Image (spheres, rainbow, N blue to C red):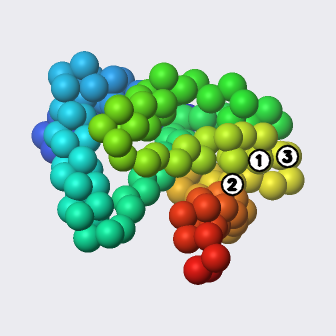
Amino acid sequence: MLTRLKHAGESDSDAVSYEECVRANVAAGRHVVVYDALETIHSLATAAGSELVVIGIPGLLDVPLTARGLEEYPYRDLHDLPCQQLQTRGVRCVDVLEAFAGAHLPDRTISWEQDRHSNDAGHERLAATMESVLREILGERI
C-alpha cells in the first residue's frame, strides 16, 4: 500500500507519495526553517545549562515490513539529512534507525500496520537508545 498525501480540494490523482512530498519540501528548502528553530532552541538550552537532544526517528510509511526490516530502508538519504544538518549547527542528534534495523521479524514488528507509528516494541527500542544517551549526558546523576 502506497500512502498518498493530498491537500484539501485536490483529487486523488493529484495526491503524491510521502516520499515525493518530503523530497519536494527539501528541494524547496522548507526544511531549513526547522533547523534554524532547533539551533535557536539549542542556544537557549545551552545558555540555561542544559543540552538539546533531537531524536531522528525513521519514517515507516510505505516501508515494507519484511524479515529484513529496515536494513534496506528506502529513505536513508532523507533520514540522514536532518542529523547531518543539525550536527553542523552544534545540535546533538541521536539516530534510532540502527536501533530499529532488523527489528521487523515475522512475529514481531516495531510499528502498527495501520499507521506505522511505533508500537510497544518500537517504544522499547527507542527507550533503550535514549537511556544510553541520558546515561552518557547525566553520568552519575542518573
Q: Is residue 76 visible?
A: yes
The kind of residue on which mark 2 rests is: Ile
Characterize the local packing of mark 1: few (<14), some (14-19) or many (20 or more) Cα atoms within 10 angstroms.
many
In the picture provided, is 58 more to the left or to the right than 120? left
Helix, strand or loop at label 2? It is loop
Q: Between 54 and 75, which is closer to the camera in this rendering? A: 54
The answer to whether any part of residue 18 appears in the image is: no
Q: Are marks 2 and 3 in contact (CB under 8 Å)?
A: no
Say if mark 3 contacts mark 1, CB within 8 Å: no
- Against 69, is 28 above or below? above
Q: Are marks 2 and 1 in contact (CB under 8 Å)?
A: yes
Task: State the image coordinates of residue 114 (x, y, percent, origin top left).
Answer: 56, 54
Crowding near pointer 2: few (<14 within 10 Å), some, many (20+)? many
> In the rendered structure, which amino acid carries the disc numbered 3?
Pro
Among the 4 quarters of the image, the one containing residue 24? top left
Label of residue 103 in the image: 1
Q: Residue furthest left?
A: 9
Mark number displayed over residue 110: 2
- Residue at image position (64%, 76%) is 140
Quarter of the image for residue 82 reads top left
Q: Which residue is mark 3?
A: 106
C-alpha distance separating marks 3 and 1: 10 Å
Which residue is rendered at x = 47% and y = 52% of the image? Answer: 55
Pointer 3: residues within 10 angstroms few (<14), some, or many (20+)?
Answer: few
Q: Closer to the camera: disc 3 or disc 1?
A: 1
